[in-house]
Image (cartoon, rainbow, N blue to C red):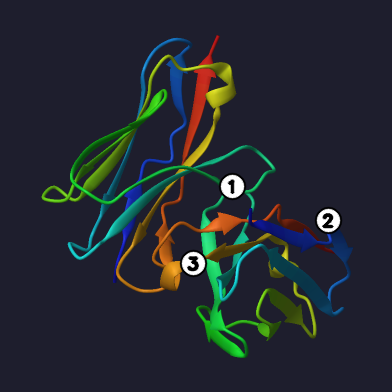
């Protein structure tokens, strides 16, 4: 069974600091990796996707993928109160579906 | 650009009543379509997905069903709602065989009383 492990939090980070979110996955055949943000009462929205080992940067967000260790991370630099949300990681295991983690609730403290 | 619509936005239904939720996508052809449910404070549970008209794959046995009567229309139904059917229902679409990003609609919040 393909599994995704994600710390549910809550994770509290001071404003301006770096928030670090992590996910591990069980299937070495995983091909694509996604980070979504979900504000309370809203639907998930894509932040980033990453396919290759290493880092991918987009503004204040950096996704890090390590296929050998089977984990993917999301770093948020210069955290803002508007970053307070639940962050979902998702993986594609080579079929038509994504498998989602349960989400990490992040709170940025002003 | 692509747009995904869901309606209604909120719904309050008595136990035992029927359900019909609709999802439509604009600006793309032959999308993969997905129905998820998210219980309060929980993760996303995939209910159904479809790779084409009339093609439905069910992930979790339950009293819900799905249909895809048109390429960009996906419907979630139930003949008799249960209390446990309450939740946030999300429709999503993806392209390229479903291995790429999924984009979510605004969701329908269902409360069964």
Q: Which residue carries the number 1 mark?
A: B41
The relative height of residue B35 versus residue B4 in the rendered view (above or below) is: below
Q: Which residue carries the number 3 mark?
A: B95
| Chain of residue at mark 3 | B
Of labels 2 and 1, earlier in sequence is 2
- Which of the two discs, 1 and 3, sits closer to the camera? 3
Q: Secondary structure at mark 1?
A: loop
Q: Nearer the viewer, residue B83 or A59?
A: A59
| Chain of residue at mark 2 | B
Q: Position of residue A24 (x, y in %)?
A: 26, 49
Mark 2–mark 3 contact, CB under 8 Å? no
Find residue A9 and name its label. Answer: none
- Which of the two discs, 2 and 1, sits closer to the camera? 2
How far apart are the two marked residues, 2 and 1, measured between alpha carbons?
A: 18 Å
Q: Nearer the viewer, residue A51 or A89?
A: A51
Q: Secondary structure at mark 3?
A: loop
Answer with left or right where residue B7 lies relative to residue A70.
right
Place residue B84 in its image quadrant. bottom right
For the point 40% across and 62% down, the residue is A99
Find residue B10 and name its label. Answer: 2
Of labels 2 and 3, earlier in sequence is 2
| Chain of residue at mark 1 | B
How far apart are the two marked residues, 2 and 3, measured between alpha carbons?
A: 28 Å
Q: Secondary structure at mark 2?
A: strand
Extreme residue toward the left, this view: A68
């Amino acid at each position: 069974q393909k599994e995704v492990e994600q710390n549910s939090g809550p994770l509290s980070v001071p404003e301006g600091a770096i928030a670090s979110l992590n996910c591990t996955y069980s299937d070495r055949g995983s091909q694509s990796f996604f980070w979504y943000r979900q504000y309370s009462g809203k639907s998930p929205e894509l932040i980033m996707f990453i396919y290759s080992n290493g880092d991918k940067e987009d503004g204040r967000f950096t996704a890090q993928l390590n296929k050998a260790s089977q984990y993917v991370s999301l770093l948020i630099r210069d955290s803002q109160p508007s970053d307070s949300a639940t962050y979902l990681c998702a993986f594609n295991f080579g079929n038509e579906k994504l498998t989602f983690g349960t989400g990490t609730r992040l709170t940025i403290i002003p | 650009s692509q747009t995904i619509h869901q309606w209604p936005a909120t719904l309050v239904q008595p136990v035992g009543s029927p359900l019909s939720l609709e999802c439509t996508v604009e600006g793309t052809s032959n999308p993969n379509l997905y129905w998820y449910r998210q219980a309060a404070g929980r993760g996303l549970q995939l209910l159904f997905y479809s790779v084409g008209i009339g093609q439905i794959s069910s992930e979790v046995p339950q009293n819900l069903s799905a249909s895809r009567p048109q390429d960009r229309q996906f419907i979630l139904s139930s003949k008799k709602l249960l209390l446990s059917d309450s939740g946030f229902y999300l429709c999503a679409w993806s392209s390229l065989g479903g291995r790429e990003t999924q984009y979510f609609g605004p969701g329908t919040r269902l409360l069964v009383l």
